Image (cartoon, rainbow, N blue to C red):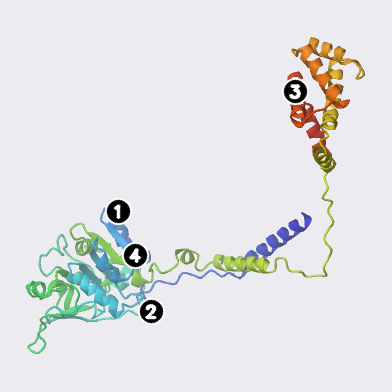
Amino acid sequence: MRQRLTIILTFVVIIGLLVLLNAVTYVKKEDARDMEFAPNRSTYHSGPTGTRALFDFLSESGYKVIRWRESTERLLKDAKVSTFVVIGQTQVAFTEEEAHALRGWVSLGGRLVLIDRALDKRLVPKSRAWSIAEKLLDFPNLDVDPSDVNQMTEHVTALHPVQPTILTQNVAEVMPSRFASRITIKPPSGDDDEKYDPDEPGVHMEQYNNASPTPTVHIGDRNGAVLVDYAYGLGKIIVLSDPYIVTNGGIRLNDNLQLATNMLVYKDGLIAFDEYHQGKGVSHNALASYFAGTPVLAIGAQVILLILLILWTNARRFGRPLPLAQVDRRSTLEFVASMAELQERSHAFDLAIENIYTRTRRVLARYAGVDNNSPRTEIAERVAARSAIDRHKLETLMRQCEETVNGAPINWRQAIDLVRRLREVERDLGLRMRSREERQAAENI
């Protein structure tokens, strides 16, 4: 026991030292300063470049919103999503397969909202040779503070809707940043008239030809459009050229929040914000992400390594071999068991009755208040006087036992019957001699 206690204490001391070592060497990483030059447009991010305020507003307003943390290829298998939102430059680039799946989902009736200053051409396909392109007017540098409204909107005037549409409903003016790009619309030429792309999943010729191919400008100025949309297959693609309008730092300005709501809310459907390409995909371990940047993971790895070391070294000898301790296996009742077996083999039932009856007679004499050498008649008479036991039956039982001890023939059935009757007398008198003997035997072990 002392050896085990030493091992346990050693293990606890080692764990404590590991925790102390990790705590001393741990240096907390300071939160990186939010920059418009390298923004984080995730809905998990509460900084000025994040979009958590928009997500929380839609959620608390009763709209159905989720954070989409799977590949866009899963959209084709999920009929619940009606609006898919991609905001800003993503941390993980779209693959060709993902872009193809997203275009196919839109062509089947989905609503894609792209909010970025630089457009990914794979996500804004042509609509019968009508195409859109971005034009950058300014680009943020490292000194721009996205939390400073004055810096973000310096020399910028609010933009008004070009025409009354569903997207500009209840929108008087919006305030973009000075880094907002402008969208230009390119009509088809005679050489590149695009009729139908058979590789797009879900786009049928009849559906494609019946859709209006011309992009619609909703908000813009003399430099170009800021908000446009156009049909693609059975669905629609909406493009906003400035993420600042929907970020935590700019959504509270003017009617920016109303414009964001108009773009995202569509027939009470489910709105999915793309977090997969913001680096928050389900492929990441949630537990590891939660403890990332803390010494907990290092401590856990060291503890596992220590446990494996203990298991590997278990039962391995580090010194000279020692003889095993000699433990006496014999019990104090082994003699009794051996004698009982010998009596059973030799059919010495009279000896067994003698062993039991002698102790019972001695107890009965003590109970009757007479000497052990008193006649059985006197013992039976006095016991019957002090109890409800019949004197004649007790005297008969004592006589039969004494005759057996003196050599009267008896078989094993009769021996068992005599023992049973003796135990009944003990029970009726409350002598409980057997339990006392068992307790004494256990104390002697």
The image's mark for residue 421 is 3
Q: Nearer the viewer, mark 2 or mark 4?
A: 4
* Gap between marks 1 and 2 measured at Cα: 35 Å
Residue 157 seen: no
Q: Residue furthest top?
A: 385
Q: Where residue 157 sits: x, y (%)? A: 21, 71
* 10 Å crowding of disc 4: few (<14), some (14-19), many (20+): many
Looking at the figure, which quarter contains the N terminus?
bottom right
In the rendered structure, the answer to whether residue 387 lies left or right of residue 211 reads: right
The image shows residue 372, relative to residue 235, as above or below, that is above
Residue 90 seen: yes
Identify the mark nearer the N-term, 2 or 3.
2
Q: Residue furthest bottom?
A: 191
Question: Quick one: SS at disc 1?
Answer: helix
* Gap between marks 4 and 1 measured at Cα: 14 Å
Q: Nearer the viewer, mark 3 or mark 4?
A: 3
The image shows residue 103, relative to residue 351, as above or below, that is below
Callout 3, which amino acid?
Arg
In the rendered structure, the answer to whether residue 88 lies left or right of residue 311 reads: left
Callout 2, which amino acid?
Leu
Question: Quick one: SS at disc 3?
Answer: helix
Q: Nearer the viewer, mark 1 or mark 2?
A: 1
Residue at the disc numbered 2: 142
Identify the mark nearer the N-term, 3 or 1.
1
Residue shown at 56%/65% (left/top)?
296
The image shows residue 443, relative to residue 264, as above or below, that is above
Callout 1, which amino acid?
Glu
In the rendered structure, the answer to whether residue 187 lies left or right of residue 340 reads: left
Residue at the disc numbered 4: 43
Residue at the disc numbered 1: 60
